[in-house]
Image: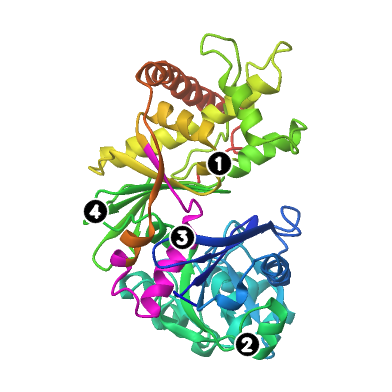
C-alpha cells in the first residue's frame, strides 16, 4: 500500500456515512445508508440500529483491507447506557430528545439525560454499568474500550466533570475516562473485524462530536472563518478568538485550544424539508427537480408564507409550524418556495446576529447534505448575500475524522496542518446582486409578518406557545 488511509465514520441523526480518505484529501471510497427506524424511533432509540446499519454499509465499501486506521464521529449530546456485557439498554436518548433532569448551575449536556434515564427506568438503573456517547459507542463496539472524547479541558464541563458527576449523585465509575481527538482508543478486536468486515488489529483513534469534526473538516480553525453545517439540523459556526455572550447564539470552546465556536443553531432545517417532501407526496422525487420548480416561482408571484414555529426562543426550530395565506391556487411548488424561504431566511438571520456580535462573515464554507445541491446552495448565497464555498468532501465530518486520524498516526503535527492539506474547495457560489435585492425585500416583509403573527398567536392562545 503506497499511502495510509483513514476510514472516517459519521453517525448522523438520519443516516450513517463512511469514507476512506488519503492524506491529500482524496476520497477513495464512500458509502452511506439511512438508519433503519428513523424517524419513528427517535424517542425510543435502539442503539443496535447503528451497528446493524454500519455493518451493511461497510459491506459495500471497496478496499476495506487497505484501511490503516479508523475514526468515528457522531451526533450528540446523545447518551447510551451499557450493561456489564457492553450491551445497550433501551432506550438511548438522542440529542433531540427533550427528556432530561437538569440541575441548577450545571453545564453538562449529557448528565441531565443520564439522570432522566436513571430516574425513570428502574430496570436500566439496576443494570447500567456505563453511560457513553454516540460516537464512543461505535468505537466501543470496534475495540471493547470505553472512552469519552473531549476537544480540551475547557470543553469538558459541557460533557462531564467529577464535580458535576457528584452533584448529580452518580458514581464516577459510570462514566468513561476523557480522551482528546486523535488519541488511541484501542484496536479492532477479532469479533468486530468479522462483524464489520474490517482488518483485525488496526488502530481506532478518538473522534468526537459531529459538529466539531465538521469544523475541522471545513478548516474552520482560524478566527474569522465560518462554516454552514447543514443536514437534519444546521449550524452557522464562526471561529472566534474571543467569547461572545448573546442568548441567541451558542458559545463553546473550539476544537483548537484558546478559540471559541460561536454558532447560530437551527435545530431542524433539513428535517423541515424532509417533512415537506413527505406530506406533499414527493419523497421519491429528486431534490434538484423539486428545487428547480421552487426556484422558478417568480418573486412577484403569489405564494404563501411558512412559519416554522410560534415559539419565541434562542434557537430556531420546526415545531407547530404553519402555512399562512395558503390558497386554492397554490400547489407544491409554491408551498415548497415558502418552506425553502423560511430556511434561507433563518440562515440569514443567524448570520446577521453573528455580525451584530463582531463575528464578521465574508465567505462561508458549506457542508453537509444541503451543500450537495447546487441549486439550493446558490439560492442560499442569494438570500444571505454571502459567498458560499463547497469543499470536495462535502460530508465534512468524514474529512474531519481523516484529519484527526492522520494526526493520531503522526502523519501531521496538528489539526490545523491536517485540515489545510485535506480540505480543498470544489465550487464557489457568488450571490447574484439583483436576486439578493429581491430576497432582501421579501426577507424584511417575512420578519415583519412573522413577528406580528407570533404576537397575535400568543394572545389568542395563551399558554399554547410558551417561551423556550
Q: Residue at x 51, y 49 (%)?
A: 368
Q: Residue at x 31, y 42 (%)?
A: 354
In the picture of the structure, the residue carrying the numbered disc 1 is 269
Q: Are marks 2 and 3 in contact (CB under 8 Å)?
A: no
Which range of residues does the magenta coloring cover?
388-417
N-term-proximal mark, 4 vs 2: 2
Q: Are marks 1 and 3 in contact (CB under 8 Å)?
A: no
- Occupied quadrant, residue 120: bottom right
Q: Is residue 382 above or below residue 5?
A: above
N-term-proximal mark, 2 vs 3: 3
Q: Secondary structure at mark 1?
A: helix
In the picture of the structure, the residue carrying the numbered disc 4 is 223
In the picture of the structure, the residue carrying the numbered disc 3 is 26
Q: Position of residue 333 (x, y in %)?
A: 66, 21
The foreground one among 340 and 398 is: 398
N-term-proximal mark, 2 vs 1: 2
Which of the numbered marks, if any, corresponds to residue 102?
none
In the picture of the structure, the residue carrying the numbered disc 2 is 129
N-term-proximal mark, 4 vs 1: 4
N-term-proximal mark, 1 vs 3: 3
Q: Is residue 50 above or below residue 272?
A: below
Distance from Cα at disc 2 to Cα at disc 1 = 36 Å
Q: Secondary structure at mark 3?
A: loop
Q: Residue at x 55, y 27 (%)?
A: 459
Amino acid at each position: 500500500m503506497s499511502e495510509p488511509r483513514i476510514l472516517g465514520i459519521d453517525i448522523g441523526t438520519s443516516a450513517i456515512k463512511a469514507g476512506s480518505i488519503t492524506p491529500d484529501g482524496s476520497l477513495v471510497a464512500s458509502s452511506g445508508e439511512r438508519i433503519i427506524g428513523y424517524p419513528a424511533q427517535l424517542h425510543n432509540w435502539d442503539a443496535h440500529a447503528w451497528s446493524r446499519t454500519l455493518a451493511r454499509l461497510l459491506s459495500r465499501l471497496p478496499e476495506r483491507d487497505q484501511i490503516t486506521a479508523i475514526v468515528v464521529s457522531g451526533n450528540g449530546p446523545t447518551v447510551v447506557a451499557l450493561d456489564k456485557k457492553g450491551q445497550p439498554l433501551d432506550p438511548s436518548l438522542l440529542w433531540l430528545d427533550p427528556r432530561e433532569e437538569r440541575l441548577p448551575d450545571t453545564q453538562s449536556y449529557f448528565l441531565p439525560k443520564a439522570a432522566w434515564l436513571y430516574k425513570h427506568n428502574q430496570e436500566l438503573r439496576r443494570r447500567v454499568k456505563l453511560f457513553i456517547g454516540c460516537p464512543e459507542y461505535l468505537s466501543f463496539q470496534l475495540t471493547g474500550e470505553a472512552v469519552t472524547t473531549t476537544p480540551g479541558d475547557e470543553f469538558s464541563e459541557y460533557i462531564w466533570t467529577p464535580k458535576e458527576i457528584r452533584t448529580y449523585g452518580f458514581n464516577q465509575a459510570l462514566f468513561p475516562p476523557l480522551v482528546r481527538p486523535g488519541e488511541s482508543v484501542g484496536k479492532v478486536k477479532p469479533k468486530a473485524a468479522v462483524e464489520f468486515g474490517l482488518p483485525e488489529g488496526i488502530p481506532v483513534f478518538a473522534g468526537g462530536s459531529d459538529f466539531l469534526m465538521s469544523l475541522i473538516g471545513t478548516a474552520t480553525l482560524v478566527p474569522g472563518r465560518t462554516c454552514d453545517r447543514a443536514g437534519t439540523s444546521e449550524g452557522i459556526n464562526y471561529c472566534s478568538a474571543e467569547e461572545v455572550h448573546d442568548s441567541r447564539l451558542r458559545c463553546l470552546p473550539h476544537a483548537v485550544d484558546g478559540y471559541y465556536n460561536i454558532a447560530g443553531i437551527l435545530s431542524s432545517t433539513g428535517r423541515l424539508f424532509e417533512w415537506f417532501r413527505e406530506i406533499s407526496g414527493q419523497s421519491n422525487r429528486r431534490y434538484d427537480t423539486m428545487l428547480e420548480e421552487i426556484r422558478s416561482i417568480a418573486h412577484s408571484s403569489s405564494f404563501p408564507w411558512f412559519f416554522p414555529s410560534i415559539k419565541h426562543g434562542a434557537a430556531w426550530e420546526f415545531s407547530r409550524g404553519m402555512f399562512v395565506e395558503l390558497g386554492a391556487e397554490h400547489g407544491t411548488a409554491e408551498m415548497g418556495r415558502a418552506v425553502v424561504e423560511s430556511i434561507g431566511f433563518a440562515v440569514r438571520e443567524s448570520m446577521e446576529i453573528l455580525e451584530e456580535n463582531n463575528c464578521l462573515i465574508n465567505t462561508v464554507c458549506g457542508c453537509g447534505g444541503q451543500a450537495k445541491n447546487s441549486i439550493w446552495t446558490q439560492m442560499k448565497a442569494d438570500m444571505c448575500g454571502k459567498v458560499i464555498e463547497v469543499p470536495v468532501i462535502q460530508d465534512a465530518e468524514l474529512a474531519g475524522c481523516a484529519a484527526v486520524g492522520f494526526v493520531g498516526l503522526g502523519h501531521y503535527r496538528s489539526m490545523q496542518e491536517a485540515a489545510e492539506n485535506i480540505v480543498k474547495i470544489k465550487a464557489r457560489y457568488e450571490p447574484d446582486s439583483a436576486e439578493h435585492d429581491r430576497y432582501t425585500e421579501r426577507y424584511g416583509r417575512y420578519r415583519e409578518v412573522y413577528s406580528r403573527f407570533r404576537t397575535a398567536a400568543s394572545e389568542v392562545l395563551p399558554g399554547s406557545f410558551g417561551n423556550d
